Image: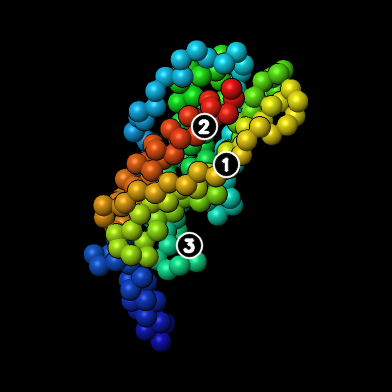
Amino acid sequence: MKRFFAATVLLAAAGCLPSGGTREAQRYYILDAPESNTASAGVPRLTTLVVPPTSAANFYDTQDLVFSRSPGTRAYYQFNSWTERPGRAIHDLLVSRLERSGGFRAVVGEDKPVPNGLVLRTDLEELYHDAVTPPGEARIVLVAELIDSGRNVSLARRSFTQSAPAPTYDAQGAVQGFRQALGTLVGEVVAWAIEQSK
């Protein structure tokens, strides 16, 4: 009886593994973006821009890649992850692009009070592979708000939405779409922040 039970457990365990008896290898992707063609800002504003870390909606505040195969649903890809949480990657990319834009006297990439400076707060609302219709598209929604810290007033607020086609119906294809969409979105946020700071 004990031998029969042990054999049953082993067979059940074997059925949980893919054919060949080995689990699929975990893959990690870097969330980066191609350089945008944003023109130089010219003469920089005589102010410092503070860019606190990008916050994220709870479901997207993870290293897991998100997809949707039916409207109104979200799920995490198995065995596919980001190397870091998307909010951090987006923040680092924004700070880097803002510094290179030459639009401000200085850009501070942390939540640090600066007298008479401007603050650019960003919140990642969505980042998922919309796979309802194969191969789908990568979608990103980011809300940005520019604040005058000296007067403690909001100068402008805007929701940015970008999408790009996924060349293949899987996590790897989604990542390619995310990179393309993020490159365009970050360029838009940088140009908007410079324009609103005038």
Q: Classify mark 2: helix, strand or loop.
A: helix
Q: Nearer the viewer, mark 3 or mark 1?
A: 1
Say which quarter of the image contains residue 147.
top right
Q: CA distance from mark 2 to mark 3?
A: 30 Å
- Whether 16 is drawn above or below 98: the answer is below
Categorize mark 1 by other alpha carbons within 10 Å: few (<14), some (14-19), many (20+).
few
Quarter the C terminus occupies? top right
x, y (%) of residue 11? 33, 76
Q: In the rendering, which numbered label is found on residue 39?
A: none
Residue located beneath label 2 in the image: 192
Q: In the rendering, which numbered label is found on residue 74?
A: 3
One can see residue 58 in this view: yes
- Whether 132 is drawn above or below 58: the answer is below
Q: Nearer the viewer, mark 2 or mark 3?
A: 2
Q: Closer to the N terminus: mark 2 or mark 3?
A: 3
What colouring method underlies this structural image? rainbow
Q: Which residue is found at the position 66% from the left and 32% from the top?
A: 155
